[in-house]
Image (spheres, rainbow, N blue to C red):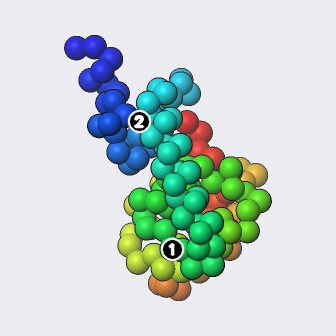
Amino acid sequence: MGNASMHPTTTQLTPAKALEIAKNCEDGSVPASVTAVLERAINELWQRIQAQPSTYVMNKEEFIIFNYYRSRFANAAAAQQAVARFWNNFQGDTTEIDGSRCPPPGGQTIPSTGKNGIRGAVALQPFDV
């Protein structure tokens, strides 16, 4: 089988699968089809956040993608507020959220308290991919 089986085409690729592929690219070389899906997803999500900057609440899947691109929005107040709203409304298992509460060394964080009363910090630097 060729490379096509390793990396689905853009029409087959969900944002979640694209993110999984991107995180597993050991050499840092993310296939263009994967990047296209992720860019479309983050741009659509950012438009939703900007359209409702004080009320939009990301779901878990959106947050995981947003978290992957968090450095892009590090200085945006609307992004910081959206992240805080996510944690204030999140009711799932925090271990399902890829390293989002563990900033890399020197990473910026936003204080956050979730509905479960656990205080934490949301990292604002990108994952190494």
| Quadrant containing the C terminus in the rendered view | top right
Horizontal side, residue 71 vs residue 28: left or right: right
Question: Is residue 103 shown to the viewer in this render?
Answer: no
Q: Is residue 7 above or below residue 20?
A: above
Q: Residue 127 appears in which quarter of the rendering?
A: top right
Q: Amino acid at mark 2?
A: Ile
Write the residue at 53% across / 43% down. Answer: 39
Write the residue at 48% across / 50% down. Answer: 41
Q: Secondary structure at mark 1?
A: loop
Alpha-carbon neighbours of circle 2 within 10 Å: few (<14), some, or many (≥20)?
A: many
Of the numbered discs 2 and 1, the one sitting upstream in the chain is 2
Horizontal side, residue 41 vs residue 127: left or right: left
Mark 2 vs 1: CB contact within 8 A? no
In x, y percent, where is residue 119? 60, 78
In x, y percent, where is residue 106? 76, 52
Horizontal side, residue 74 vs residue 54: left or right: right
Q: Residue 76 appears in which quarter of the rendering?
A: bottom right
**Circle 1 residue:** 57
Write the residue at 44% across / 34% down. Answer: 34
Write the residue at 68% across / 50% down. Answer: 72
Horizontal side, residue 79 vs residue 65: left or right: right
**Circle 2 residue:** 21
Question: Is residue 17 shown to the viewer in this render?
Answer: yes
Q: Amino acid at mark 1?
A: Val
